[in-house]
Image: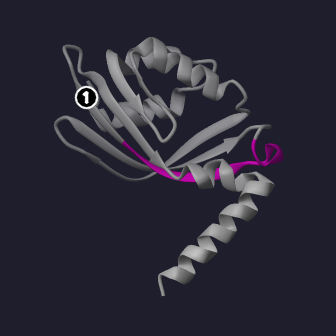
Amino acid sequence: MSSKLVRAKDAFHSLDKNNLDVVDDFYDKKAIFQDPIHKIQGTKAIRNYYKGLYNNVDSIRFEFKSTSETKEFVTLEWTMYLRTPVINFGKEISLDGASIIKFGGKEGKVIFHRDYFDLGEFVYERIPVLKTVIKIIKSKMKGSSS
């Protein structure tokens, strides 16, 4: 069996709207998945999450940076490159993030997966009206820390 780190990278490289079977192969039936928007449990919910997420995706790929593996955990620092008509007028965007993945259970699959990324950078700052508001807020916050 390959290392947990290799399994995690392979899962993210192969997961897309046409290959949702990866969910059943990678995640335990009772796995918990959490990101800045959702906290869900079970492969059915995780599959539906990815199905909805990838529905409007033209292309997605991950570049892995710093990674580590212990007996139970894999951590991945990544940059996601995404092209979708619903963000940035269909032009490719990049987003930095990190994942903490815990393996366990009887089958040694993922029992917990948490993604960390800046939701503002990913979505809100790409909407023209919100981008301006967020820029003002950030500017004021920088000024108050002096």
Residue 137 falls left or right of residue 41:
right
Give above or below for 2 relative to 86. Answer: above
Q: Residue furthest left?
A: 71
Q: Which residue appears at 49% of the width and 49% of the height?
A: 117
Q: Is residue 36 visible?
A: yes
- Judged from the image, the secondary structure of the residue bearing numbered disc 1 is strand
| First to last magenta residue range | 87-99
Q: Which residue appears at 53% of the width and 28% of the height?
A: 14
Q: Position of residue 79 (x, y in %)?
A: 53, 51
138 or 49: which is nearer to us?
Answer: 138
Name the residue carrying label 1.
Answer: 103
Crowd band around label 1 with a 10 angstrom C-alpha radius: few (<14), some (14–19), many (20+): many
Q: Which residue appears at 40% of the width and 29% of the height?
A: 33
Give above or below for 123 relative to 113. Answer: below
Q: Is residue 88 magenta?
A: yes
Give above or below for 37 relative to 125. Answer: above
Residue 16 falls left or right of residue 128:
left
Q: Give the quadrant of the N terminus.
A: top left
Q: Which residue appears at 46% of the width and 11% of the height?
A: 44
Q: Amino acid at mark 1?
A: Phe
Residue 106 falls left or right of residue 85:
left
Q: Position of residue 141 (x, y in %)?
A: 55, 74
Q: Residue furthest right?
A: 89
Q: Is residue 143 magenta?
A: no
